[in-house]
Image: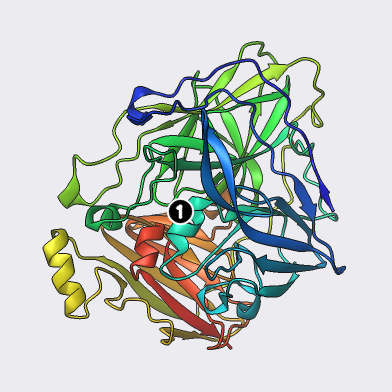
Amino acid sequence: MINRRTALVGGLAVMATPALLINRAFAAETGRPLPIPPVMDIDNGAGNLITARRGQQEFLSGVQTPTLGYDLDYLGPTLRMKRGQTARLTVANATDDPISAHWHGAHVPGNMDGGPQLAFGSGETWNAELDMSQPAATLWYHSHVHGQTGSQVYRGLAGLLIVDDPDAPDGLPNDYGVDDIPVVVQDRSFDRRGGFSYDVGSMTSMQGLRGREILVNGAINPVADVPKGLVRLRLLNGSNARIYHFSISDGRRFFQVASDGGLLATPVSRTAVTLAPAERIEIVVDLSDDTQPIRLVSGEDTNVPMSMMGGGSGGGQFDVLTLQPRADLTPSATQLPLSLPAAAMPIEAPVRTRDFNLNMHTGGMISSMFRGLLGNPTMSINDQGYDIDTINEQVRLGDTELWRITANIMAHPFHVHGTSFQVVSRNGRTVDPVTQGWKDVLLVEGRAEILVRFDKPADAAAPFMYHCHILEHEDAGMMGQFTVS
């Protein structure tokens, strides 16, 4: 059963910055109350069902935009699962195209991972049984059909997935939708009829698609009413390509308490955090002394190929979400814990090393067209474009490996399915894994090293993926697959 928490109505209008506005006949609906996705508690019983379907939603004043969603018109419910339980869930496809449900960040076998090999057609269903053995974490789920991932996620086939650990309470704000806020940040553009504008040409496929409006949980620059006290934000960069550089508008400090793979050992004080596509982070902001609203803002994304410099998003800082403190709301936590029940680090020494070069071939439309005609992909890893029938790597179950990733031309968010990893170094500089936490996406600019342990099996019929999480790059071939046995 879905338990719905209704977002409280806020009274402030948040103005989008001019750089993010689009010349069209419809006005952006800013300042709406932040939508809070309903919660679906998934246990080991039967009857848990979500349906991918078509819908429509009013993002812009006076127009309904055609969308996709899992159970909802746009996006999906927040799925909550418990460590130590088997979560049983049926996914139905009521769309017109094949879809999948990839449990991004979940430590599950390949045949439950929901990657491209497990896509299923219109009118079909897929039964997932997820043995949740990992620590508490904020994950997400999305469709992962090769060649269509970018389009399907852009139209709404995504949602949050929260793993709770009943045996390890963290002492953090935990009143979902009140002081424990899901924040799915996406950028979208609209055409003159108010529909999503997803047009991937040669330039877009190179730099990734960036939208002109910033959505949070499906609303443009919304307002969240929150208690005067500690507020936990579960931030997901759900955009196809945009990198966010988050901070608070008044420059105040906040505390990072979790990364992709779960809690940090101790809260880390920060004034800004960078989040690449598919990365998650949990932060706690103290609004105890605030009566006026504060704003979550982001700096611009300049991550474009060197040959396309000058074609970035521009516009400087822009608003993402307004937090309106209210004295009549009660916080669930009054003090930030000094330590958190994080998973232990580090893992053991690697038994082998593998190298992954994320290849881009720029040079414009004609060059890209000729590469395609010659069978040479414009996007690849180790000069091999994705082939659903090719297993690129074979890994032994239980092994720990050192993976060295190199990114050329621009920065790429590198994602590994079925596990979490520990960051060792970036561009030759050692990284403190305690402050980074467990990761499953790493923004690689230059060279990075990660330690990965493989504890879940995957065979050739349903292998794991590794890929760039700029979705246009992934769809264009910057992806490989591996087995674990």
Is residue 394 rendered to the left or right of residue 172?
Answer: left
Q: Nearer the viewer, residue 15 or 238?
A: 15
Is residue 56 rendered to the left or right of residue 243?
Answer: right
Q: Is residue 424 visible?
A: no
Q: In the displayed structure, would residue 479 be above or below residue 167?
A: below
Q: In the displayed structure, would residue 190 be above or below residue 204?
A: above
Q: Residue at x 43, y 58 (%)?
A: 150
The quadrant holding residue 448 is bottom left
Q: Say which element carries label 1.
A: loop
Q: In the displayed structure, would residue 235 be above or below residue 86?
A: above
Quadrant that contains the C terminus: bottom right
Q: Residue at x 17, y 69 (%)?
A: 369
Q: Which residue is mark 1?
A: 431
Disc 1 residue type (three-letter): Val
Residue 373 is situated, as x and y percent measured from the top left of the image, at 18, 77
Q: Is residue 92 visible?
A: yes
Residue 218 is situated, as x and y percent measured from the top left of the image, at 57, 39
Q: Nearer the viewer, residue 16 or 405?
A: 16
Q: Residue furthest top?
A: 291
Q: Residue furthest right?
A: 45
